[in-house]
Image: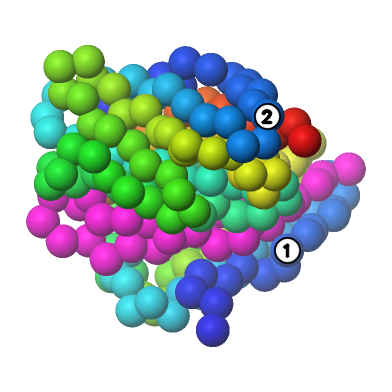
Amino acid sequence: AQSVTQLDSHVSVSEGTPVLLRCNYSSSYSPSLFWYVQHPNKGLQLLLKYTSAATLVKGINGFEAEFKKSETSFHLTKPSAHMSDAAEYFCVVSGVDYKLSFGAGTTVTVRA
Amino acid sequence: DTAVSQTPKYLVTQMGNDKSIKCEQNLGHDTMYWYKQDSKKFLKIMFSYNNKELIINETVPNRFSPKSPDKAHLNLHINSLELGDSAVYFCASSQVGTGGRETQYFGPGTRLLVL
């Protein structure tokens, strides 16, 4: 079985400053990991995914995430936050049984 | 040219009614899913179909019945709606290869409110 823990339920940043969203995972095999974003009253959009290739994964809208096996982490970062980044972010792990296990989500607020 | 579409977008209904939510994908994927997002935004898988066959059936009341007429469609029928069924329901699809780890693409969601 696999699971993810998002360490922060809410992150507030100023526009133009870095964003860090933390995610730890648990998996009994080499996992596939994803970050999805959900804007208010919208569906889920894939930001990026890790599937055992490069450990530093670049996604859309300037986001990137680093897979660290030794720390079982997959933290999401962006160097400079924009107002449009205000949303809910989900860290997700995929298992061989087709199931996605979602973290509880991190709400990002961006201050002008 | 929406990849995964759901209808309706909003659904308000009375307790005890029966309702259906439709999902269609034009990505050519062979696997489709239904997820439920509760009021705390927690997402949990309900069902999955691969090539019209049920492959995942989580602990969901049997009032919920998925139906897949073909690979591109996965509909969700709910009988005798209860207040606790109020949630956002997301459809998703993927092309499953070895390991089953392919990316899932989500629809815009159906916001169900049971009064």
Give the magenta range.
Answer: B89-115
Quick one: label 2, few (<14), some, or many (20+) residues within 10 Å?
A: some
Q: Chain of mark 2?
A: A
Residue B50, picture quadrant: bottom left
Please say if A65 is above or below B96. Answer: above
Q: Position of residue A66 (x, y in %)?
A: 28, 33
Q: Residue sitting at 49 percent across and 53 percent down? A: A61
Q: Residue sitting at 20 percent across and 25 percent down? A: A68
Q: Position of residue B62 (x, y in %)?
A: 53, 44
Observer able to see residue B81: yes
For the C terminus of chain B, the quadrant is top right
Q: Amino acid at mark 2?
A: Ser
Q: Which residue is mark 1?
A: B9
Please say if B73 is above or below A11. Answer: below
Q: Amino acid at mark 1?
A: Lys
Q: Residue sitting at 82 percent across and 45 percent down? A: B114
Q: How many marks?
A: 2
Q: Residue sitting at 61 percent across and 68 percent down? A: B6
Q: Which residue is mark 2?
A: A14
Q: Is residue B31 magenta?
A: no
Disc number at residue A13?
A: none
Quick one: label 1, few (<14), some, or many (20+) residues within 10 Å?
A: some
Q: CA distance from mark 2 to mark 1?
A: 33 Å
